[in-house]
Amino acid sequence: METLRTEFDFTLPRGYVDNEGNLYKNGTMRLANAIDEIAPLRDPRVRANQAYLVIILLSRVITRLGTITDVTPKHVEGLFASDLAYLQKFYRQINENGTSQFSVQCPSCSTEFEVDFGQLGGELQAIPSTSSTKR
Ligand SMILES: [Zn+2]
Protein backbone atom coordinates (compact mmCIF):
# COMPACT_ATOMS: atom_id res chain seq x y z
CA MET A 1 0.00 0.00 0.00
CA GLU A 2 1.53 3.22 -1.15
CA THR A 3 0.44 6.55 0.22
CA LEU A 4 1.40 9.89 -1.23
CA ARG A 5 4.05 11.45 0.90
CA THR A 6 4.17 15.22 0.99
CA GLU A 7 6.93 15.75 3.58
CA PHE A 8 10.48 14.47 3.48
CA ASP A 9 13.28 14.55 6.03
CA PHE A 10 16.72 15.78 5.05
CA THR A 11 20.14 15.94 6.65
CA LEU A 12 22.31 18.95 5.89
CA PRO A 13 25.95 18.24 4.95
CA ARG A 14 27.21 20.91 7.37
CA GLY A 15 24.23 22.22 9.28
CA TYR A 16 22.65 25.51 10.22
CA VAL A 17 24.28 27.40 13.07
CA ASP A 18 22.10 29.87 14.97
CA ASN A 19 23.19 33.00 16.88
CA GLU A 20 23.83 30.98 20.03
CA GLY A 21 26.06 28.54 18.15
CA ASN A 22 23.54 25.69 18.13
CA LEU A 23 23.90 23.32 15.18
CA TYR A 24 20.85 22.03 13.32
CA LYS A 25 21.43 19.28 10.77
CA ASN A 26 18.04 17.63 10.34
CA GLY A 27 14.97 19.15 8.82
CA THR A 28 11.79 18.53 6.88
CA MET A 29 10.76 19.77 3.46
CA ARG A 30 7.27 19.58 1.99
CA LEU A 31 6.42 19.20 -1.67
CA ALA A 32 6.04 22.52 -3.47
CA ASN A 33 2.77 23.91 -4.80
CA ALA A 34 2.54 26.09 -7.89
CA ILE A 35 2.11 29.14 -5.66
CA ASP A 36 5.46 28.40 -3.99
CA GLU A 37 7.21 29.06 -7.30
CA ILE A 38 4.97 32.00 -8.30
CA ALA A 39 4.82 33.94 -5.03
CA PRO A 40 8.58 34.67 -4.84
CA LEU A 41 8.39 36.39 -8.24
CA ARG A 42 6.24 39.10 -6.65
CA ASP A 43 8.81 39.68 -3.90
CA PRO A 44 10.79 42.91 -4.39
CA ARG A 45 13.97 41.14 -3.20
CA VAL A 46 13.63 38.72 -6.13
CA ARG A 47 12.91 41.59 -8.54
CA ALA A 48 16.18 43.17 -7.43
CA ASN A 49 18.15 39.92 -7.48
CA GLN A 50 16.96 36.75 -9.24
CA ALA A 51 19.30 34.62 -7.13
CA TYR A 52 17.10 35.45 -4.15
CA LEU A 53 14.26 33.36 -5.62
CA VAL A 54 15.72 30.10 -4.32
CA ILE A 55 16.11 31.62 -0.83
CA ILE A 56 12.42 32.52 -0.65
CA LEU A 57 11.31 29.30 -2.31
CA LEU A 58 13.24 27.13 0.16
CA SER A 59 12.05 29.16 3.16
CA ARG A 60 8.46 28.37 2.07
CA VAL A 61 8.88 24.61 1.66
CA ILE A 62 11.20 23.89 4.60
CA THR A 63 8.75 23.24 7.41
CA ARG A 64 11.36 22.45 10.05
CA LEU A 65 15.06 23.04 10.56
CA GLY A 66 16.18 21.33 13.75
CA THR A 67 13.86 22.84 16.37
CA ILE A 68 13.03 25.85 14.19
CA THR A 69 9.52 25.51 12.81
CA ASP A 70 9.09 29.07 11.50
CA VAL A 71 11.79 28.99 8.82
CA THR A 72 12.25 32.41 7.21
CA PRO A 73 14.42 33.66 4.31
CA LYS A 74 16.84 34.93 7.01
CA HIS A 75 17.47 31.34 8.14
CA VAL A 76 18.06 30.16 4.57
CA GLU A 77 20.39 33.12 3.93
CA GLY A 78 22.47 31.95 6.89
CA LEU A 79 23.07 28.48 5.46
CA PHE A 80 26.47 27.38 4.22
CA ALA A 81 26.73 27.32 0.41
CA SER A 82 27.13 23.53 0.42
CA ASP A 83 23.91 23.13 2.45
CA LEU A 84 22.05 25.46 0.08
CA ALA A 85 23.25 23.44 -2.92
CA TYR A 86 22.19 20.22 -1.20
CA LEU A 87 18.71 21.61 -0.45
CA GLN A 88 18.25 22.69 -4.07
CA LYS A 89 19.09 19.15 -5.22
CA PHE A 90 16.81 17.70 -2.52
CA TYR A 91 14.00 20.02 -3.67
CA ARG A 92 14.38 18.79 -7.26
CA GLN A 93 14.57 15.15 -6.18
CA ILE A 94 11.33 15.11 -4.16
CA ASN A 95 9.34 17.37 -6.50
CA GLU A 96 10.34 15.57 -9.70
CA ASN A 97 10.17 12.03 -8.36
CA GLY A 98 7.81 12.25 -5.37
CA THR A 99 10.30 10.39 -3.24
CA SER A 100 13.58 11.09 -1.51
CA GLN A 101 14.83 7.61 -2.48
CA PHE A 102 16.43 6.70 -5.74
CA SER A 103 18.07 3.63 -7.23
CA VAL A 104 21.75 3.30 -7.97
CA GLN A 105 23.48 0.33 -9.54
CA CYS A 106 26.77 -1.08 -8.36
CA PRO A 107 29.18 -0.73 -11.30
CA SER A 108 30.95 -4.02 -10.60
CA CYS A 109 28.16 -6.47 -9.72
CA SER A 110 25.12 -4.59 -11.06
CA THR A 111 23.25 -4.95 -7.75
CA GLU A 112 20.63 -2.23 -7.36
CA PHE A 113 20.56 -0.18 -4.20
CA GLU A 114 17.98 2.23 -2.86
CA VAL A 115 19.65 5.38 -1.62
CA ASP A 116 17.79 7.89 0.53
CA PHE A 117 18.71 11.38 -0.63
CA GLY A 118 17.53 12.64 2.75
CA GLN A 119 20.50 10.88 4.28
CA LEU A 120 23.11 11.98 1.75
CA GLY A 121 23.99 15.08 3.71
CA GLY A 122 24.81 12.97 6.72
CA GLU A 123 25.74 9.33 6.44
CA LEU A 124 25.22 7.58 3.14
CA GLN A 125 22.95 4.63 3.72
CA ALA A 126 22.58 2.19 0.87
CA ILE A 127 20.09 -0.58 1.42
CA PRO A 128 19.67 -3.40 -1.11
CA SER A 129 16.60 -2.63 -3.18
CA THR A 130 13.66 -4.92 -2.44
CA SER A 131 11.70 -3.59 -5.40
CA SER A 132 14.37 -4.69 -7.90
CA THR A 133 13.52 -8.37 -7.34
CA LYS A 134 9.98 -7.69 -8.53
CA ARG A 135 11.13 -6.21 -11.82
ZN1 LIG B 1 28.59 -4.68 -6.12
Image (tube, helix red, strand yellow):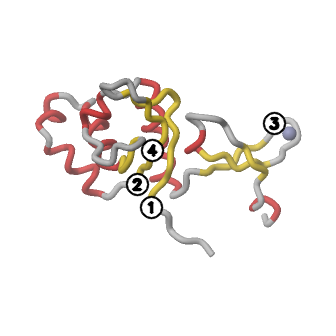
Q: What residue is shown at x 72% (from left), y 43% (from top)?
A: 126
Q: In the rendered structure, which disc, 1 or 4, sits on the residue that comes first in sequence?
A: 1
Of the residues shown, which amino acid type is indicated by label 2? Arg
Identify the residue shown where x is 66% and y is 37%: 124
Element type at marker 1? loop
Q: Do the residues labelled 2 and 1 touch (CB within 8 Å)?
A: yes
Point out residue 71 in the picture as x, y percentages from the top left corner: 29, 43
Mark pair 2, 3: CA separation: 33 Å
What residue sits right under mark 3 in the picture?
107
For the residue labelled by badge 4, is the local secondary structure a helix, a strand or a loop?
Answer: strand
- Label number found at residue 27: 4
55 in relation to 128, above or below: above
Whether the residue under disc 2 has CB within 8 Å of ligand 1: no
Q: How far apart are marks 4 and 3 (CA)?
A: 32 Å
Q: Which of 128 and 19 is in front in this view?
A: 19
Give the number of the disc on residue 29. none
Picture disc at residue 6: 1
Q: Is mark 3 within 8 Å of ligand 1?
A: yes
Q: Is residue 9 left or right of residue 79?
A: right
Q: Name the residue under label 2.
A: 30
Callout 1, which amino acid?
Thr
Contact, mark 2 vs mark 3 (Cβ under 8 Å): no
Seen at 44% across and 61% down, the residue is 6
